[in-house]
Image (spheres, rainbow, N blue to C red):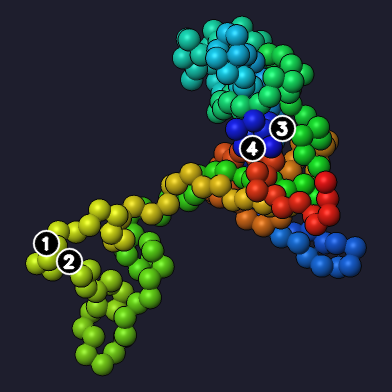
């Protein structure tokens, strides 16, 4: 199933912890709160030209909601959320839900499943070339005067006489939308609506993330 037609959940990155297996091995996991995902609109081929579920997560004060959006949410009968996102799904999947429905985590994800997690990375501000592109620094002695952590020559001399677009140089680092693929779901806490996913996911604590079924998950050899 491609990412364009798979239903996922919106959530908030709570932080990282570790779980212990029966053998005593420590597994680092990221805890993601995916509680109270509400369907705000079911888009159909006839009305909208494509099939999708519009989902919201979190809670927002009424004073922070625009009047058009407030009317849109009131029509669905759901509380205003902090983020709204659409998931392209098949017509059969969209038919299972109606506006105002809540998406339960246990129906969409299971232990051992591969997932893709998308979030906004931590912003680092303006960064130098070495830090931004993971270049190796220069020698710290033997005549290298105050040039230890600079890129050195960029090879743009009289020919071609300009800097090529895309040249790796200093600039803004972080605050990018990044997807980490093929992460394992270690535990599903249905009571608290939490997903515990092996490893790190993009973003800082409290940041919003999107969890979807993995689109590049490898099937086991011999599986149909």
Q: Position of residue 84 (x, y in %)?
A: 56, 25
Quarter the N terminus occupies: top right
- Looking at the rendered image, the disc whose residue lies closer to the viewer, 1 or 3, is 1
| Residue 212 image label | none
Provide the residue designation for mark 3. 35
Q: Position of residue 170 (x, y in %)?
A: 29, 60
Q: Nearer the viewer, residue 96 or 1?
A: 1
Q: Earlier in the sequence, mark 4 or mark 1?
A: 4
Q: Can residue 17 be seen?
A: no
Q: Give residue 51's quadrant in the image.
A: top right
Q: Earlier in the sequence, mark 2 or mark 3?
A: 3
**Contact (CB < 8 A) between labels 2 and 1?**
yes
Q: Is residue 134 above or below residue 163?
A: below
State the residue lying farthest toward the bottom.
142
Measured Cα–Cα span from mark 4 to mark 1: 45 Å
Measured Cα–Cα span from mark 3 to mark 4: 24 Å
Q: Residue placed at 31% from the left, 74% from the top?
A: 149
Provide the residue designation for mark 2. 156
The secondary structure type at the circle numbered 3 is loop
């Amino acid at each position: 199933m491609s990412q364009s037609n798979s239903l996922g959940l919106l959530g908030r990155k709570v932080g990282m912890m570790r779980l212990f297996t029966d053998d005593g091995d420590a597994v680092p996991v990221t805890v993601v709160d995916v509680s109270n995902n509400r369907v705000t609109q079911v888009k159909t081929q006839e009305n909208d030209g494509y099939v999708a579920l519009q989902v919201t997560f979190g809670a927002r004060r009424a004073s922070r909601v625009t009047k058009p959006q407030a009317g849109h949410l009131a029509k669905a009968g759901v509380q205003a959320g902090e983020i709204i996102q659409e998931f392209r799904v098949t017509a059969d999947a969209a038919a299972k839900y109606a506006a105002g429905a809540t998406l339960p985590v246990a129906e969409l994800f299971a232990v051992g499943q591969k997932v893709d997690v998308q979030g906004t990375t931590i912003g680092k501000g303006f960064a130098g070339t070495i830090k931004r592109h993971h270049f190796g620094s220069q020698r710290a002695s033997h005549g290298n005067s105050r040039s230890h952590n600079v890129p050195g020559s960029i090879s743009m001399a009289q020919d071609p006489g300009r800097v090529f677009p895309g040249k790796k140089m200093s600039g803004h680092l972080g605050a990018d939308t990044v997807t980490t693929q093929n992460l394992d779901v270690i535990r599903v806490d249905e009571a608290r609506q939490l997903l515990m996913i092996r490893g790190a996911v993009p973003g800082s604590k409290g940041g919003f993330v999107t969890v979807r079924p993995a689109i590049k998950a490898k099937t086991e050899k011999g599986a149909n």
